[in-house]
Amino acid sequence: MIVWSDDYTGFYGYISAQGGFLGGDGGFVETSSRINLQAFGMGTVQSFFGEVGRWLLDPTNVTITAATTTDMSNEGPNPGGGATTPTGNIWYPIDNSVAATSQLSVATLNTLLGTGNVAVLTSGPLDRGEPGNITLNAGVTVSWISGNSLRLLADGNLILNGSISGGDSGTLELSSSSGGQATQGAASVISVGGLLLNNLGGNTLLNGANVVDRIGARSLSGAVSFRDTGGFNGATGLIISSVISGAVNGFVNNTSSQTTLGSTTANGINSSGTVNLTSVGPVTQTQRIDMGDGDLCVVTLNAIGQNILLTNPQNAVRTISMQTLNATGTAPVAANIRFVEESGFAVGQTANMGIVTAAGLASLRPGAITTARPLIPAPGGSVVLTGGASGDSLRANIS
């Protein structure tokens, strides 16, 4: 489905090009304009059993760099030609014929994050026919301590070669409108209180020495893997929680009126693919895991056993694998594993499951549920798997 114009495209509705419930890939959607695109609607190109589709919104690649800002703007229109042009905290690509790529200075970004929430877009009035990737250059650190949100909203992929540090009160949203993937370079570190993964897919691998307290995810597909090496909250560890990226005020191109990108909320984890979580601390939850068509793998890596306690009675998964291992992932250590699910689930290892390490995904230990605790409850520890917490005994199967 293509919505295109020579002058102005206003998209405020909902478009679905979703794959079928029995099979089929997601479709192709384009909402674009040669001059002015106002795309504030919603939609989906997801697929339950096939490949995720693609959504095109005049994408342009954007690089966050230590150099100066070129072919990027946060300005609105100035029809009266006065001395003051309004500005906002939404950055979008433009074509000033200054450079072959659109780049945003990290110094500018850091300054704005000290005063408010900031969004970086790859969609705007410029269309170079690029996939709409956002790249954070190696050696560059986005840093703020204000408690604000940084929202990286790509049409394509997110490539993090540098680091992002927002402190224990900062929030980072990584989003792809096309279900693209997010990856980290060898020296990249994400250090924020709240991490929100939005509409990511492919082979998303966030395997830096990340420091995150709370993680929330919505509309994931493919295989999404995240590594947490410690949080600001000490012994609390990694919490599957509610994460909100704040609203941002500004302009989506230089002819638009003042607008607000509304806040985004992820309550727990929602995915139709595989999610791998690896943490050096315990893993707990305050919000539901909604993965009835997906597979969940949780591993703790620590010489001192770290618990995996996922006991929300509304959890829904297809398959689980949970392991409490030593720091190198080579042997089980004693810790508690407790998992509660609303209906029924399988215990096993699927093809995309693995331990998230700095080098990438490593193989799991034999056995889907692995810990040094005996299966018969022992003093101070236990393994408890509960299906049918919804009360529907006809579906309360654990296999």
Image (cartoon, rainbow, N blue to C red):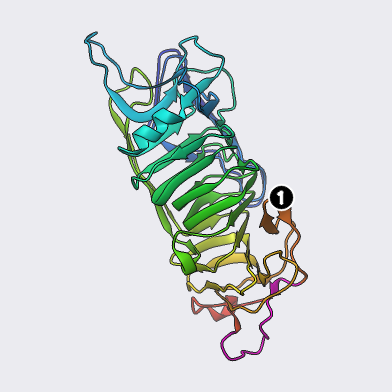
Residue for point 47% across, 25% down: 104
The residue lying toward the viewer, choosing from 25 and 39, is 39
Residue for point 61% across, 74% down: 304
Q: Position of residue 124 (x, y in %)?
A: 44, 23
The C terminus lies in quadrant: bottom right
Please tell me whether the stretch drawn in magenta is mainly helix, strand or loop.
loop
Residue for point 51% across, 58% down: 269
Tell me which corner region of the image, top left, top right, bottom left or bottom right, holds residue 45.
top right
In magenta stretch: residue 102: no
Please, what is the three-letter code of the amino acid marked with disc 1?
Answer: Ala
**Considering only vertical position in the picture, is 30 above or below 142?**
above
Q: What residue is shown with label 1?
A: 359
Label 1 residue SS: loop
Q: Where does the magenta region start and end?
A: 367-381
The N terminus lies in quadrant: top right
Can residue 44 be seen in the rendering of this structure?
no
